Amino acid sequence: MTTKSWNVRIGLVLGLSFLLALCIRGLSSSFMGGNNFWIYRLLDNLSAYQLFLFPGGVLLLYLRKVHYFENSGNVNARLHKCLQIIFVGIKDLLPTQEGSKSSSPSSKTPVSQKSKIITLLYCVVGLQVSYLTWGYLQERIMTRDYYDSTGKMKRFSDSQFLVFVNRILGFSLAILYLAFHSRGNPSGAPVYKYSYCSFTNIMSSWCQYEALKFVSFPTQVLSKACKVIPVMIMGRIVSNKKYEYYEYVVACMLSFGMILFLFGTPSN
């Protein structure tokens, strides 16, 4: 297939994605009462993400259908390298057996028990302080009134902006860490496979900020205890994983305790 026809098809996919996003936004705005309804905001975010996910999926299927990476002798080298990193990965970055043997745990200096305890305490304190500070600040942002540009008192309602700032800072720290402590992509996995966990993580954070408009942060954290039950169910169905009886009892007790907390909290 010629480069011209390839560009035409990609252009058509991008155009259809843009039209689909506009249709979703228009329908949700018309039938759901504008952006005051949380389902509208959810569909608005999904329509924006599909501008990248849908064309990327179509491009992946197309490259596989035409066997692009097996018959890429007359293509641009930089484009081929970029597509290979995104859709195929680079297996050459995987460590060899010689390298793995040289870096085996037996060749490392043994760590003392005191050093292990200090490291554990450092991780526990750092995790608790960071998590509590993060929870306090995000609840403060979502539940306090602020003056807007017109001088009116309103609550901050743009959860997507908070997710964006959160991910930008996380991305920057990850880049700095990889720049000083790692080389390239050590797993060699294609970049697009990271989009699965990335998308679900972003949407879970968005739902978390939206939930703070209706419940407090402690209630939200305790409600996460219920996720043990669906995780165990999916592990049983998908992975055929077996759990001990006491694990089911612990999951039910956690959920029951959360229910008691919610019903025992006085409503304002």
Image (tube, grey):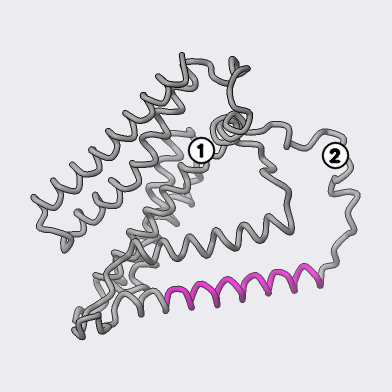
In the drawing, does residue 223 fall left or right of residue 145? right
Q: In the rendered image, which quarter contains the C terminus?
A: bottom left
Q: Nearer the viewer, residue 123 or 37?
A: 37
User: Residue at (73%, 48%) from the top-left corner?
Assistant: 183
Q: Residue 203, percent across and down?
A: 37, 53
Q: Is residue 172 above or below residue 156?
A: above
- Alpha carbon distance from label 2 to label 1: 27 Å
Between discs 2 and 1, the one toward the N terminus? 2
**Label 2 crowd bin: few (<14), some (14–19), many (20+), radius 10 Å:** few
User: What span is in magenta?
Assistant: 114-136
Q: Nearer the viewer, mark 2 or mark 1?
A: 1
In which quarter of the view is residue 158 placed? bottom left
User: Residue at (25%, 84%) from the top-left corner?
Assistant: 147
Q: Residue 107, percent across and down?
A: 91, 50
In the drawing, does residue 83 fall left or right of residue 177? left
Residue linked to disc 1:
192
Q: Nearer the viewer, residue 132 or 72?
A: 72
Q: Nearer the viewer, residue 30 or 200?
A: 30
Residue linked to disc 2:
99
